[in-house]
Image (cartoon, helix red, strand yellow):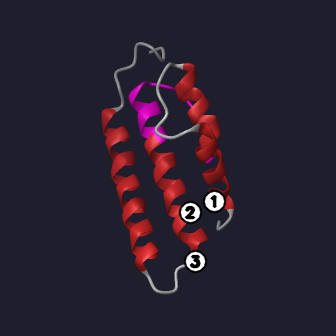
Amino acid sequence: MTQKNRPPRTEEAEYLLRLAGLDEKAFYALLNASETLTTHALFHVQQAVEKILKAVLVSHNVVFRRTHDLVELADLLTARGIDLPAPRERLASLSAYAVRFR
């Protein structure tokens, strides 16, 4: 099947959104902890946003390479006329947190 003829990968998109929700919960838990390092909390924000972007791409049958680069994922969305959830510059600033703690 070609990319355009494939049915939407709804289950995969829903799974990514559930994982993003867990990252969001981790972010808030860290944010409210007494000894939180901001960078650890921001790692989970980056992860949640990454999974949300990938869920949208998957639901539109957009093929993407394995990456943590939010700008690259955002560019794939905008190339298809899909609005971004945040300004590109904000996404760029979060991308650094993807690999800082791996």
Q: Image check: 17 left or right of 42?
A: left
Q: Residue 99 in the image: x percent, y percent?
A: 67, 59
The earlier-in-sequence mark between 1 and 2 is 2
**Residue 101 versus residue 96 in the image, above or below:** below
Residue at 39% over, 74% down: 29
Assign the N terminus to one quadrant of the image.
top left
Which portion, as a residue range, is magenta? 53-68
Mark 3 / mark 2, whichever is N-terminal? 3
Question: Residue flagged by tag 3: what amino acid is it?
Answer: Leu
- State the image coordinates of residue 89 (x, y, percent, origin top left): 64, 42
Q: Residue at x 46, y 38 (%)?
A: 85
Which mark sits nearer the N-terminus, 1 or 3?
Answer: 3
- Disc 1: which residue: 97
Seen in the picture, residue 56 relative to 40 is either above or below; the reply is: above
Residue assigned mark 2: 43
Question: Which residue in the structure is indicated by mark 3?
Answer: 37
Residue in the foreground of this view, choosing between 100 and 3: 100
Above or below: residue 94 compared with residue 65: below
Q: Nearer the viewer, residue 23 or 29?
A: 29
Whether residues under marks 1 and 2 lie with C-beta atoms below 8 angstroms apart, the answer is: yes
Number of other residues with Cα within 10 Å of mark 3, as a class: few under 14, some 14 to 19, many 20 or more: few
Q: CA distance from mark 3 to mark 2?
A: 10 Å
- Circle 1 sits in a helix, a strand or a loop, which is it? helix
Which-is-in-front pick, marks 1 and 3? 3
Q: Is residue 65 visible?
A: no
